[in-house]
Amino acid sequence: MISVDPPTAVVSKIRPDQPVADVRAEICNLGNFFASLEAATGWQNANPNGLLASVADDYAITRQAMIKLGWASTVQ
């Protein structure tokens, strides 16, 4: 990731409470991007168990998971 515009952008996350068979369908496809926390209020109200994170934070967490799974290089 090089930059985010707007810098206040957040991504929504719904994490399953059981193992998943299809990461893209059961995790990635449920993520939405919003310009800010305020813009995500409606989503958060509709998904009380969902999480919101800055795009930079979510990128870092997801990248570490991908490295551990062997899906990404440790070289950036």
Image (cartoon, rainbow, N blue to C red):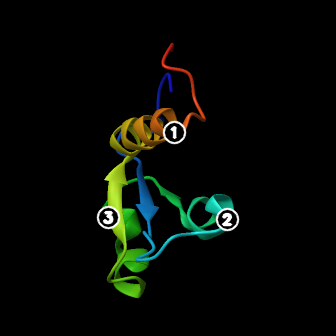
What number is the disc on residue 21?
none
* Residue projecting furthest to the top: 75
Whole-percent x, y for residue 45 in the image? 35, 84
Residue 38's quadrant in the figure? bottom left
Whole-percent x, y for residue 23 in the image? 62, 60
Front residue of 56/60: it is 60
Q: Are marks 2 and 3 in contact (CB under 8 Å)?
A: no
Which residue is at a point 46% across and 76% down the rendered structure image? 18
Q: Are marks 1 and 3 in contact (CB under 8 Å)?
A: no
Q: Is tag 2's residue or tag 3's residue first in the polypeptide sequence? A: 2
Circle 2 is placed at which residue position?
A: 22
Circle 3 is placed at which residue position?
A: 38
Q: Nearer the viewer, mark 1 or mark 3?
A: 1
Circle 1 is placed at which residue position?
A: 66
Q: Amino acid at mark 1?
A: Met
Question: Regarding mark 2 in the picture, which secondary structure is present there?
Answer: loop
Question: Regarding mark 3 in the picture, which secondary structure is present there?
Answer: helix
Measure the alpha-carbon separation of dots 1 and 2. 14 Å
Whole-percent x, y for residue 73 in the image? 56, 21
